[in-house]
Image (spheres, rainbow, N blue to C red):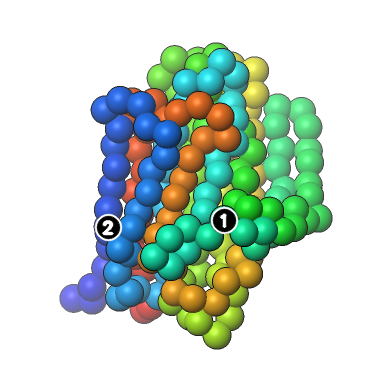
Amino acid sequence: MASEPYQLISRNTLSGTASDITFSSIPSTFEHLQIKATMRGDVSADGHALRVQMGNSSVETGSIYSMQYLWGSSNTFEYSTATANTTYFNFYDTILGANATSGRFGFAVITILDYLNASKNTSFIAQIGNYGASDKRAGLYGGVMDFTSAIDIIKMYPQTGDFVANTDVALYGIKSS
């Protein structure tokens, strides 16, 4: 029997609040990485942004993150041709806030491609969504980080406020078939 291509590296399910969730010492035994997250925050809003930074030994905070997105909400469609040279990846309205319907969480699935390849920039694809009280949103993102070292640390944090209890974030390694 062939081995499973997805393997859980680490999972963090919060029992209280946290300002960020960081995965460090990521092993170099996979081809790609994937983050699967359900998130809720403590800010008085229907939803707010998830920010992500990556690096080698420490997160990169320079203006090296660029992305494009396409998303729709209840009756709106929006796209961005580029958000270039920012200090983090910004996934809009991915974290449901305190004003959202109780028990609901925003979600994100972020796939980091070829995270060990030092001969090209690090890239990702992502799907996000939420189902808040007044804001229902789904989106697709793609981006690149002007960085050519292996990724071994990933930090995720809300635009404002903290993650709350039952936020669940898992990091998977994906092996080639």
Instruction: Report which residue position mark 2 lands on.
Output: 8
Based on the displayed image, in which of its 4 quarters is residue 38 positioned?
Answer: top left
Residue extending farthest to the left is 1
Picture coordinates of residue 150, whole percent (x, y): 44, 74
Question: Residue at position x 70%, y 42% from top?
Answer: 71
Q: Earlier in the sequence, mark 2 or mark 1?
A: 2
Helix, strand or loop at label 2? It is strand
Based on the displayed image, in which of its 4 quarters is residue 73 positioned?
Answer: top right
Q: Quadrant of the N terminus?
A: bottom left
The answer to whether residue 6 shows anywhere in this view is no
Amino acid type, residue under disc 1 in the picture: Thr
When the figure is inspected, residue 48 is found, relative to residue 128, above or below; the finding is above
Is residue 29 or residue 135 the one in the foreground?
A: 29
Question: Residue at position x 78%, y 32% from top?
Answer: 76
Task: Name the front one of labels 2 and 1.
Answer: 1
What's the distance in space between the residues labelled 2 and 1, CA to CA? 27 Å
Picture coordinates of residue 36, whole percent (x, y): 41, 48
Helix, strand or loop at label 1? It is loop
Is residue 147 or residue 102 the one in the foreground?
A: 147
Mark 1 surroundings: few (<14), some (14-19) or many (≥20) residues within 10 A = few
Q: Are marks 2 and 1 in contact (CB under 8 Å)?
A: no
When the figure is inspected, residue 144 is found, relative to residue 120, above or below; the finding is above
Question: Residue at position x 74%, y 58% from top?
Answer: 84
When the figure is inspected, residue 159 is found, relative to residue 142, above or below; the finding is above
Side of 50 relative to 142 (left or right): left
Instruction: Report which residue position mark 1 lands on.
Output: 61
Amino acid type, residue under disc 2 in the picture: Leu
Picture coordinates of residue 5, whole percent (x, y): 32, 69
Question: Residue at position x 33%, y 58% from top?
Answer: 24
Q: Quadrant of the C terminus?
A: bottom left
